[in-house]
Amino acid sequence: MPYHFTPASRPIALSSAFFLANLLAMPLASLAQTPSASHAHARNAKACQPADIEAKKHRHETETLGARHADQHAHMRLVQCEVERGVRKVPAKGILKSADQTLKDDEAAKQAAFKTRKGKPADLRGLGGGSALAEPGGTPTLAAAAAGNLDPATMGRWSDPFIIPVVGVAAVLLHTGNVMFWSYDPVDYHNPANSKNGVAFIWNPSSRTGYNIPPPENVWCAGQTILSDGRVYLAGGNLRYPDPNAPGGATNWAGTLTNYTFNPLNELWAKQPDMVRGRWYPTVTQLADNRVVITSGMDETGYGAITNAVEVLTPDPNIDGIGTIQVVSTHNSSGLYPLQFLLPSGQMLEAGPNAASSFQLNPATWNWSGLPRMKSDHYYLGNGISYTDASPAQPRQLIMVAGGHTEKIPLAANEWLDGFNPALGWKTYPQWQTPRHNANTVILPDGTLLTVGGNKGLYGYEDAEFSTELYSKAAIDTTGTWLKLAPHTIQAAYHSTAILLPDATVLLSQDDMDYSAQAAFQHKAQVYSPPYLFKGPQPKITAAPTNVAYGQSFNISTDRSDMVSAVLVAPGATTHGNDMHQRAIKLRVQPRTNGLTATVPSSSALVPPGYYMLFVMDSQGIPSVAKFVRVT
C-alpha cells in the first residue's frame, strides 16, 4: 500500500600523503568542533573533527575509495570546517528578500524594460538583481550586478535571493507546476545512527513559498525520473553515512535497496519492490515504453563497491500501484551518476564519466554494445542534454555532454553525438568560456542552453563560478558560441540544482558549503529571467489539448497571431548536475490565425510518454508561459 505523509565520482589527482600532512598540520583548534563566536551554528555541525578522528576517517576512505577520492572528501570537509569556524565566507550571506518582494521586483523590472524598449524613460533603481541599463562593455561581474549595471534585455536578470528552507540537492518539476526538493536532514547529516532521516519540500513558483512533505526515508543521493502518468520515480538513496567504527572495514557510504514512486496529485508515496543491490548515486532512465533502467550506484555493503547489476522497473498501470523490478544484465559503469539518454532507435546511451564509457543498451535483448570513445573524460559531475528538432521532414537529435574533471583540472570539453547516427562518434561542441564541474545546464524554450554555477577548483566548493553562460543558437546548431550573461550571487557548486520553470525562467538552488542546520533552514535560491523575457510581454496560450497522441496534429490557440514555433520540454529531474529527465523536442508547426497547428512525432523513442511543458514562441523569440500536455 502507498505511504501517506501529510504535508507539514571519480578520484582527483593529488598526493594523499601531502594533502593529509597539510590537513593535520592545521592547529588542533581549527579541527575542534567549537565554532567561532562570530559564526555560531546549530549544535549539529560536524565538519570540524579532532585531528585523530579526521586521520582515521581519511585512512579508511583511502583503503576503500582510493587515495585521490579520499583526498577529495577530506578537502570538502576541510572547506566546510572553515565555514563552520567562520574563516571562509559564504557568498550572498545576509543578502535576502522576501519571496513576495522578489516576485514584485521581477515583474517591475520587466515592465521597466518594456518602457525602455518603447523609448520611454524607466526608473530601474531599487529593483535589485542587476536590473538596470547596460554596462559599458566588459565581462559581467558580481559587483556590476549588485550595482544594477546590467541590461536585462541582453544579459538577463537574477532575482534577489530568497529562502527555500531545504537544501535543494535534488529538484523535480511536477506536472502540477510545483517543484519538489529533497535532501538529507541537516540535523542528522553525517550521523550514522540517523542515516535514514531525510527532508523534502514542495515549492510553488507562483508564490515562491511551499511546505514540508516528509519523504519515506533518506532518498538523498537517489536517481530520479518521471513516469508517463506524472509519478516521480526514485531509486536508491542513503542507507548509511560513513562510519569509521563499522566492523570489518565497511566504513564507506552505503546505498539503500529501496525505491519509491510519488504521486504529486495526492502526495502519496508507494514503495516499490526492493532492488537486488543497494544504490547510492545511481542513474535512472525512462525508456520509450515507460520502463526505467537503473544503473550504477554504490552498494549496501559499505565497502565502496559500485553495483554492476542493471535493473529495470516496470511500473504498475495504477498511479498508486506497485510495479515489478528485475535484473536484466550486468554492466561495469566507470563511475557514479553516469549520464544516460534515450536514443531514437529506442536504445539507451551511456556517456561517461570515463571517455571509454560510450555504450548502447538494447532493451530488446539487454545487450550492451560499444560506441566510439568520447573525446574526454567527464568525471566528478559533468552535464548532459538531449535536444530533438522534429520540425523538418527528417528529424535530428543531438546529445551534448559538457564539463566535469579530467582527474587533474576542471574542463569544458563540450562534445556531441548524433542521436540518429551514434556510430559516427563524438564531435567537438562549442566550448564554455569557463571550464567548470558541479554546474547545471538547462534547456530553454527557444532551444538555447543555459549553464550556471559550478566551480573551477579541484573539489566541491572552492573557486566557485558565478557566471551564467548562454549558448547563442538552438542546441542542434553546432556553430554557436557561449556568451557570458548576468552572474548569480548565491554560490552554486556541489549539491546545487537548476531547473526550468513553466514561466520560462530558471530556478537555481545554492550549494551546501555551509551544511549546518541553521544554514539549511535559511537556504537560498534565485530565479533567472533570460533576455527573451525583457523583449516584450509573453504570448498566452488560450487553448490547447491536455492530452495528445503520437502522430497527432493539434491546434494551439494564442492571444496573438505572430507565433512561429512550438516546443515540448520535459520537466527536469536533477541532482548533482545530472538531469535524468530533461529533454526538448521542437515540433513541426503550421501557422494559423492566433495560433499554430503542431504535430507530435510518431515515435515514443523521440518523445517518451508523459507530461511535457508546451511552449510557443513568437516572431521576436519570446516564449509563452507553458501549458502541461500529456503525450500518450
Image: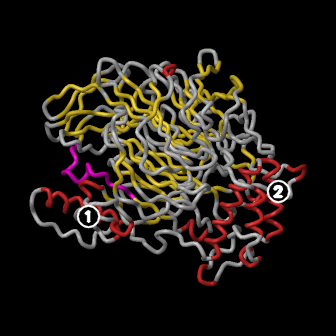
Tell me if 441 is positioned left or right of 159 in this view.
Answer: right
Q: Is residue 57 visible?
A: yes
**Residue found farthest to the top:** 365
Q: Position of residue 621 (x, y in %)?
A: 23, 42
Q: Please tell me which residue is depicted at 60% across the width and 79% down the height of the picture.
A: 39
Q: Tell me which colouring the rendered structure shows.
A: secondary structure
Q: Which residue is mark 1?
A: 135
Give the vertical position of 462 relative to 444 (above or below): below
Q: Which residue is mark 2?
A: 59
Residue 284 lies in magenta, yes or no? no
> Which region shows up in magenta?
527-540
Foreground: 456 or 46? 456
Q: Mark 2: which amino acid?
A: Arg
Foreground: 371 or 48? 371
**Residue found farthest to the bottom:** 37
Give the distance between the C-alpha atoms of the residues marked 1 and 2, in whole angstroms.
51 Å
